[in-house]
Image: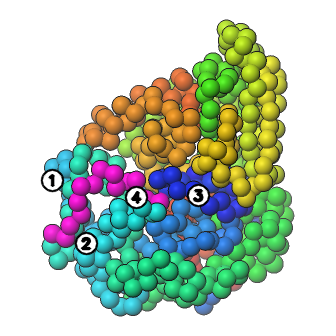
Amino acid sequence: MHSTSRRLRLAAVAVGVASVLALAGCAGGAKPASSGPDAKLTTMTPAGTAELDKITWNVFQGEPQTIDPYHGADYTPNMINSNMCENLLAQTPDFQIKPNLAKSFSNPDPLTWVYELRDDVTFWDGTPMTADDVVWSMQHNIDDKTTFYGYLYNSVASISKTGDHQVTVKLKTPDYLFNEELASFAGVVVEKKFYEENGAKVGTPEVGLMCTGPYKFVKWTQGQSISATRYDGYWNKELPLKVKNIDFTFVTDDSAITSGLLSGQIDGTYGPPTAGIPQLQTSSAGKLYSGPAPLEVTLVVANTKGAMGNADVRKALQMAIDWKGVGAQTYAGQGKPTALQTVPAVYGFAKEQLTAYADTVKTDGTPQIDAAKKLLAGVPADVKSQEISLVVPQQAETQQFGVAVKSAADKIGLKFKLNVVPATGYSNYLYDPATRGSTDLLYTQFWPNIPNPLDWLGLTAVTGASFNQSGYTGIDDLYGQAIAEKDDSARAKLVVDMEKKLHDEMTPMFPGIELTNDVWLGNKITGAPAAFDYVFYPWAAYLAGTGK
């Protein structure tokens, strides 16, 4: 996924990748919060036991365009859908990938994945989930060319029912990323009959959805809220499910969100407004929790025909940026400089190897002006004299970030231009080459589909990736080898080789600022995951009352 402002719904132009644009949000609690990148992070907030009839939860990006999971690849639709529609596999709050609607899976040969399905799952209308539903749901990613997740099926040759509760996927070439991607909406299961009857109307206010999740769609009041109610026939009895009804509201104004949280009109939210932190931290109306997240604020190299085509210019600019200051000031202490283009939350199977390599190149984010100037001294004058342009959306945090980058460029003698454009149209710069033109750098906040470094790299640094606007091809061969490699340790070595190459060349994405995930819970609720897991996992099923 990708993003440029969590305050804003940025519709992604179809480029064959499930990514979404966003911005950082922070919050506070009953006591001054011990938040920030070096504070102790929380995976789950304290469990509750009390039943609640109804709560209001705000989705900070505003009203979604659709809640069809095949077309949801942004904070708002996913934050809602994750409680209604389920995937074959699940990515848990501790960033593990585990069986879900598929109770087990096997890989009998490099070209075959077999999924054994649960036999106790029903859709909200009471109809049992069948292998036919699963085959149709997976095949829809191939048949519907407008889905966000179809590209993850590029290696699939066939999907077939091979038993009453068994589905088999045959591949054209070995792909050891495919299976884990089924913990995103690439593996969503919907009711075949419902989709065939309603077609393109699925996900609209008039029709809604038909899935298997812990909450079922009730009503979409346009401009106001989406209402969901607990599905008492839900199969997973391990989840608390203490809240009966949830209204997902669409407030986007920072002041209105903060006021709603303080007054209790809004019971909870992920990504509370950064501007509201001082008030929230001293309020007794609720509490802030910060959790680990695969979120990175960074710069994408969009054009290599100008000065940014020179690796030393890219390295010098990255070295000169005050990443430490950006994390502390622009992101209210929630940002921590990253060593690599991939953040630790998604190191996954390569955690040991990537951590070891990251330790050799990490810095505290303090600007290295003298070293950057020395690096530039060897760059031809006609290269470093070319103007470098950066485009950022017109939001307080992104503009501050842009100013910090320009300041760094000025200090090391680079000619630099900062362009601020309306936030509502910013996604065009990421997806539309005509809009982007010769822009050299683009702001983004990035998050992946799953906690796997190959997913991250596949979205940012290989040919055709949605965040590879410059057309970088340097790791294509290594990536192909890694996808086809079954052995975790051998695959991890290939991942480290890719990260080294990207770091040495400082493209197509700079190491930037790793953000925490923040959740504000009003006094009457508790239990939500604090870790960034709300885009594909039924986080609301953990909510419960505090008894207050």
Which residue in the structure is indicated by mark 4? 150
Nearer the observer: mark 2 or 3; the answer is 3
Above-or-below relation of 186 to 262? above
Work out whether mark 4 precedes mark 3 in sequence or the reverse, and give the earlier one: 3
The Cα–Cα distance between marks 2 and 4, rounded to whole angstroms, is 22 Å
Q: Which residue type carries mark 4? A: Gly
Above-or-below relation of 439 to 103? above
User: Image point 61% across, 82% down: which residue?
Assistant: 226
Identify the colour scheme used.
rainbow
* Residue range (magenta): 148-162
Q: Is residue 313 on the magenta stretch?
A: no
User: Image point 76% across, 26% down: which residue?
Assistant: 387
Nearer the observer: mark 4 or 1; the answer is 4
The Cα–Cα distance between marks 4 and 1, rounded to whole angstroms, is 24 Å
Q: How would you rate the neighbour count of disc 3 (Cα within 10 Å): few for under 14, some for 14-19, many for 20 or more? A: many
Q: Which residue type carries mark 2? A: Leu
Q: Quadrant of residue 313?
A: top right
In the image shown, does 76 or 388 lie closer to the viewer?
Answer: 388
The circle drawn on residue 12 is: 3
Give the image location of residue 197, x and y in percent: 39, 85
Nearer the observer: mark 2 or 4; the answer is 4
Work out whether mark 3 precedes mark 1 in sequence or the reverse, and give the earlier one: 3
The Cα–Cα distance between marks 2 and 3, rounded to whole angstroms, is 32 Å
The circle drawn on residue 108 is: 1
Work out whether mark 4 precedes mark 1 in sequence or the reverse, and give the earlier one: 1
Above-or-below relation of 69 to 416? below
Work out whether mark 2 precedes mark 1 in sequence or the reverse, and give the earlier one: 1
